[in-house]
Amino acid sequence: METRSESASTSQRPGFAVGAHRAISLRPAEDSRLLITAGRAWVTLNLPHQADGLGDHRVCAGESLLVPAGAHLVMEPWSRGDALRFDWSVLPQAEARPQRFSRDVVKPSRELALALGQAALAFGRLLRGVLGYTEFLVAGRGRVLSRFESNPP
């Protein structure tokens, strides 16, 4: 096994590069991992079919970011004069599944619970409002009407 010294220049490191004053756009077909090997990156991640699917991230050397399938990723160097190096790898299904389950099942179930809670509160306010008008709803049923309320023939 070969070891690499940390003093190696960025041009000798494996992976992909984004030059200074450049940006790169990626659309993975499978769940993937972005690993920054040199420099700092400004990453904008757009997740379709999610209300809060747009997010900006600052990712430094040694840090990684999980990118779900179908997302749109735009990446550029954090500092305008510096280059950026990164590695891109497709996640094995076992590692990708928890993120997909969270995105496809857990988050919608939380949104549904929140919506049901809001619907229950709205129904309670409606019921309270209707019960506040009960005297108008039962007018003429067991109550003697004044001459102004009645409609004499």
Image (cartoon, rainbow, N blue to C red):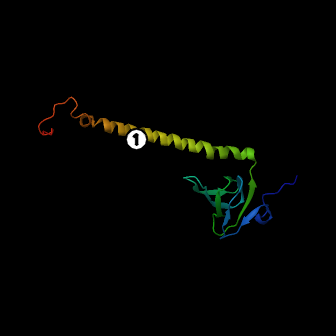
Residue at the image point whose x is 78% and y is 58% from the top: 6
- Find residue 101 and report its horizontal and vertical position in percent: 65, 43
What type is the residue that disc 1 sits on? Ala
Location of residue 83 (image quadrant): bottom right
- Find residue 4 and report its horizontal and vertical position in percent: 82, 57
Query: Which residue is at the front of the view, 148 or 4?
Result: 148
Q: Which residue occupies the extreme top position in the image? A: 142
Q: Secondary structure at mark 1?
A: helix
Looking at the image, is 115 positioned above or below residue 78? above
- Find residue 99 and report its horizontal and vertical position in percent: 66, 46
Residue at the image point whose x is 63% and y is 65% from the top: 79
Residue that mark 1 sits on: 122
Looking at the image, is 82 positioned above or below residue 57? below
- Find residue 56 and report its horizontal and vertical position in percent: 59, 58
Q: Is residue 2 left or right of residue 59?
A: right
Q: Is residue 17 left or right of residue 118?
A: right
Q: Which residue occupies the extreme left position in the image? A: 147
Looking at the image, is 143 positioned above or below residue 109? above
Location of residue 122 (image quadrant): top left
Residue at the image point whose x is 71% and y is 47% from the top: 96
Looking at the image, is 139 positioned above or below residue 43? above
- Quadrant where the image shows the C terminus: top left
Q: Is residue 4 left or right of residue 40?
A: right
Q: Residues within 10 Å of mark 1 (few under 14, many from 20)?
A: few
Report the number of discs: 1
Location of residue 152 (image quadrant): top left
Q: Which residue occupies the extreme right position in the image? A: 1
